[in-house]
Amino acid sequence: MKRYLFIILIPIALFAKKIEVVNANSLLEIVKNKILKTRSFNGAFIYTVKNKTFYGAIKFKAPNKFLFNFYGKNAKGESFDTGSKMVSDGKVFWIYLKDQNVAIRESLVRDRKTPMIGWNIDRLTKEYVATVPKEGYKVNFQNTEAYKLTFIPKNSVAGFKYINMIFNSEGDILKMEAQNQLGDKVELTIKYNEFNINIPETTFEFSPDENTQIYDNILVPEENKN
């Protein structure tokens, strides 16, 4: 009996290995760790909303400054900067449409609920709960293995019904997918060029000209003052 017992135990000794527990929090830590190491980056983006697709260049500087320059294509198919942009210096968020000379100005100091604060995972997790999708956390993104988390709102006043985050093993956020409360789907895909580069503070400054029509704080309703 001792010999048979020894034979049975051999496979357990040879093939036993540490079991890695993967859950939403452990996956989220991968993204958080990369964000902590990221002072800045630049790259390209593709933004889709209501079945309309826009693209251009993006610059980000921690913790809450960003610039999206929107591009177009001429008759030759060459890309050019349209002059339209979304930009934030961390205090004010601007959406500027150059062809209409219209600007939306959103005070980020006044509005503390909007998610327009850059790569702020802490803010995101205050309003949403990170979960592992039913189909699993591993996905194929542009022929590369990546991870996926789904964020579910904690209450009905959140801006989105759900948010999907796709990121690589290094923690780089590759794509965000969401559906707002009106049922519109929004997608943002990012391709990174350089990390931790010097980006001047003036990059995130914006001053409309005297003829620009400005709309203030229309993206998020005023909070009730009781």
Image (cartoon, grey):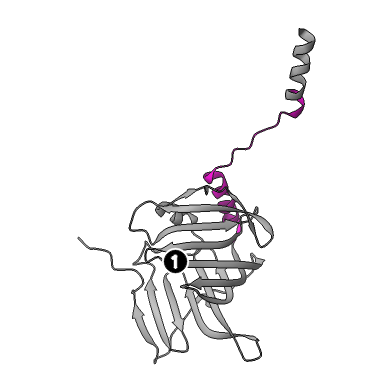
Q: Main secondary structure of the magenta part?
A: helix
21 in magenta: yes
**How many numbered discs, if any?**
1
Give the extent of the magenta segment: 13-38
Q: Amino acid at mark 1?
A: Met
Q: Residues within 10 Å of mark 1 (few under 14, many from 20)?
A: some
195 shown above or below 121: below
Farthest top residue?
1
Residue 66 place in picture, x, y as percent: 52, 70
Residue under pointer 1: 116
Residue under the image location 56 percent in, 44 percent down: 26
Residue under the image location 49 percent in, 55 percent down: 121
209 in magenta: no
Residue 18 place in picture, x, y as percent: 67, 33
Residue 188 place in picture, x, y as percent: 54, 67
208 shown above or below 222: below
88 shown above or below 157: below
Q: Can you say which quadrant of the picture contains the N terminus?
A: top right
Residue 14 place in picture, x, y as percent: 77, 26
Residue under the image location 40 percent in, 89 percent down: 212
Q: In terms of secondary structure, where does tag 1 sit?
A: loop
In the figure, residue 93 lies in which quadrant? bottom left
In screen coordinates, is 158 left or right of 6? left
In screen coordinates, is 180 left or right of 225? right
Q: Nearer the viewer, residue 19 or 2?
A: 2
In screen coordinates, is 18 left or right of 30? right
Q: Can you say which quadrant of the picture contains the C terminus?
A: bottom left
Q: Nearer the viewer, residue 208 or 50?
A: 50
Farthest left residue?
226
